[in-house]
Amino acid sequence: MISGIAGAYPASELNIGDIAIAEKEINADEGLLISCDEEDTSFLFINHEEVPLSIPEFAKNMKKGIFLTVSASTGNLRRAKFLERKFNALCENMEGFAIAKSAQTYNIPAIEIRSISNIVTDRFHLLKFDDIKKSAHIVQRFILDNIPYFS
């Protein structure tokens, strides 16, 4: 199981503290960033491998979709909209693909559940520790409350 926090893209309809389940994880930013325009030519992709993930039965009606792994959190609305549109993604994180790929390599079903810590937009500061702590607690509580259903 992969769990943690994520930044939601603007059109995802997710709010801070919401839980989201990944249908697949995509390694989304290996390549050359030319500009932060919303055009497909603003980024030259080397690779954007996808790993499908499992969705537990009890979570079938929850908000789910595509999660992106990025090397640096997006702090630019134009870049956020580009990634969101390019991959039809809900949110981004920084480690999901590595864990999902490891699980796929060893043929281990993986589930990814995240709490939204922020909405990806223009920003000029890092996330506040209290926001990170709150979102991490929400996803931890969700997992602990639902452990019996993860089969």
Image (spheres, rainbow, N blue to C red):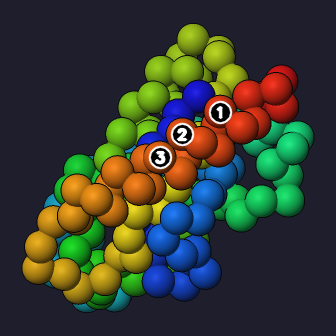
Rate crowding at label 1 as few (under 14), some (14 to 19) or many (20 or more) other CA atoms within 10 Å. Answer: few
In which quadrant is the C terminus drawn? top right
Above or below residue 145? Residue 36 is: below
Local secondary structure at mark 1: helix
What is the three-letter code of the residue carrying label 3? His
x, y (%) of residue 124?
Answer: 11, 79
For image coordinates 61% across by 58% down, the residue present is: 19
Rate crowding at label 2 as few (under 14), some (14 to 19) or many (20 or more) other CA atoms within 10 Å. Answer: some
Residue 8 is left or right of residue 148, and the answer is: left
Local secondary structure at mark 3: helix
Q: Which residue is mark 1?
A: 144
Kindly indicate whether the residue at mark 1 contacts the one at mark 2 (C-beta within 8 angstroms).
yes
Residue 72 is left or right of residue 137, and the answer is: left
Looking at the picture, tell me which residue is in the foreground, 85 or 120.
120
In which quadrant is the N terminus drawn? top right
x, y (%) of residue 135?
Answer: 44, 55
Q: Which residue is mark 3?
A: 137
Kindly indicate whether the residue at mark 3 contacts the one at mark 2 (C-beta within 8 angstroms).
yes
What is the three-letter code of the residue carrying label 2? Gln
Mark toward the start of the polypeptide (3 vs 1): 3
Residue 140 disc label = 2
Can residue 49 be seen from the camera position used here? Answer: no
What is the three-letter code of the residue carrying label 1? Leu
